[in-house]
Image (cartoon, rainbow, N blue to C red):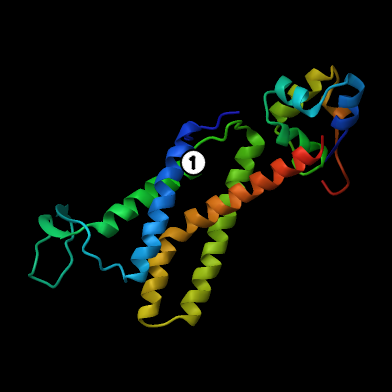
Amino acid sequence: MKNNIKVERAIKGLTQEELANKVSVSRQTINAMEANKYVPSTVLALKIAKVFNKSVEDIFTLEKTD
Amino acid sequence: MATGLLLPNKYKFIGWCLLIPATIIGIILSFKGFETNWLNAKVFAIFPGGFLGESKPFSFIETDITNTVVGILFIVGAMFVGISKEKREDEFIEKLRLSSLLWAVKVNYILLLLAVVFIYGTAFLTVVIYNMFTIPIIFIVRFNYILYRNAKIVSDEK
């Protein structure tokens, strides 16, 4: 699964730390998601989408291998 | 996300305080063949060991309890270190914890399998003694290494 958290974060002008605080996870988690090393839970995906005022599909997209 | 059955973060420090001395004394004990006479006490034993007729099950016996005490300290310490929350516990940390545990169990049994195949006689008894403690050791090393590596990547990426 791909995501454009990094891009959305840049648009909103948020740092990893700020986004992490908004969705109450560690900065490591945000970093791991941006590096495509971690697929978030549905709850976390929804929370992130809410921060960016977008739907989950706008931020997270399936890859061919999924 | 619910991370039930984890102890508060402060237990991690208490755990290290028990685990490190217990490991050091455990290594010293292993060099002495687990036969010291540092600490004698009367204890209740379900199965006291010894030869048949020498001691009854479910009785009080007088014995050296050095190994017992060190074993307890090690197990409690390792449990505290292994199952207490990180400062910032979340679903990613939880996933790392679970995958580290799985990794530790796999590595442990690969090592045990090799030991079963290649080690015979009384030396195998030593393997069994060490094997009691390898899962928590491998788990703690692996989990903390991954946490450290992730933290390092994060701090590099300002």
Q: Name which residue type carries label 1.
A: Ile
Q: For mark 1, what is the residue?
A: B83
* Residue under the point 36% across and 74% down: B125
- The residue closer to the viewer here, B133 or B13, is B13
Question: Which quadrant of the rendered structure holds the N terminus of chain B?
Answer: top right
- Residue B59: quarter of image: bottom left
| Residue A55 versus residue B61 in the image, above or below | above
Q: Is residue B145 above or below residue A1?
A: below
Q: Position of residue B120 (x, y in %)?
A: 41, 82
- Residue beneath the point at 26% across and 68% down: B35
Corner quadrant of residue B2: top right
Q: Position of residue B25 (x, y in %)?
A: 36, 58
Apparent side of residue B16 relative to residue B36 in the rendered image (left or right): right
Q: Nearer the viewer, residue A8 or B8?
A: B8
Q: Position of residue B147 (x, y in %)?
A: 64, 44
Q: Chain of mark 1?
A: B
Please determine whether, in this image, residue B86 is positioned above or below residue B54: above
Going by the image, does B111 lie left or right of B26? right
Q: Secondary structure at mark 1?
A: loop
